[in-house]
């Protein structure tokens, strides 16, 4: 799966526990009719992937959905979801030199000249 959009926030790398577990979060805002702010977490060695990106940049993030089950001290089962990134790449909005990419020329069409005035009402609807 993937998420595409513009980087809104890049968090600092956080380290947890004595085992050195690392996590870093990025928020990507989708560009659609109703933009969504999707938080994606990168863990362990994948946290370094975010070093070359900055706020405002358009990106595509490859993600995995993760789910966990947890039983609290009262015996109630709770479920948690997370979105985990494993690859990120920049998207180009323009050509590298700042110009729009070239558009293929369209063919010129000759106007139709063999229409008969009586043919205007032969549509089936």
Image: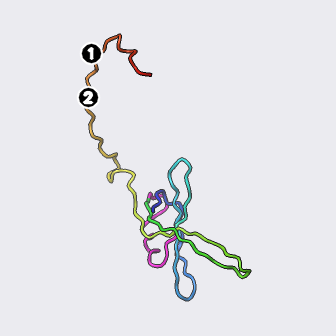
Residue 110 x/y as whole percent: 25, 23
Circle 2 sits in a helix, a strand or a loop, which is it? loop
Q: Which mark is residue 95?
A: none
Report whether 66 appears left or right of 116: right
Q: Which mark is residue 108?
A: 2
Q: Is residue 44 magenta?
A: yes
Place residue 90 in its image quadrant: bottom left
Task: Decide: few, some or many residues near mark 2? Use Cα within 10 Å; few <14, some 14-19, many ≥20.
Answer: few
Task: Decide: few, some or many residues near mark 1? Use Cα within 10 Å; few <14, some 14-19, many ≥20.
Answer: few
**Residue that sits furthest to the front in the current view:** 124
Q: Which residue occupies the foreground of this view, 16 or 66?
A: 66
For the magenta stretch, what is the residue range? 41-58
Q: Which residue sits at x=53%, y=87%?
A: 19
Disc number lying in front (1 or 2): 1
What residue does disc 1 label?
A: 114
Residue 69 x/y as whole percent: 61, 76
Q: Which residue occupies the foreground of this view, 1 or 25?
A: 1
Q: Which residue occupies the foreground of this view, 108 or 65?
A: 65
């Amino acid at each position: 799966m993937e998420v595409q959009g513009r980087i809104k926030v890049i968090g600092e790398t956080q380290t947890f526990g004595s085992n050195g577990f690392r996590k870093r979060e990025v928020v990507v805002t989708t560009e659609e009719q109703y933009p969504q702010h999707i938080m994606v977490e990168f863990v362990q060695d994948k946290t370094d992937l975010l070093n070359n990106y900055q706020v405002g940049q358009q990106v595509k993030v490859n993600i995995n959905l993760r789910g966990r089950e947890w039983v609290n001290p009262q015996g109630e089962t709770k479920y948690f979801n997370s979105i985990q990134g494993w690859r990120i790449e920049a998207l180009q909005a323009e050509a590298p030199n700042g110009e729009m990419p070239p558009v293929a020329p369209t063919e010129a069409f000759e106007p139709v000249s063999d229409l008969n005035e009586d043919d205007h009402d032969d549509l089936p609807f």
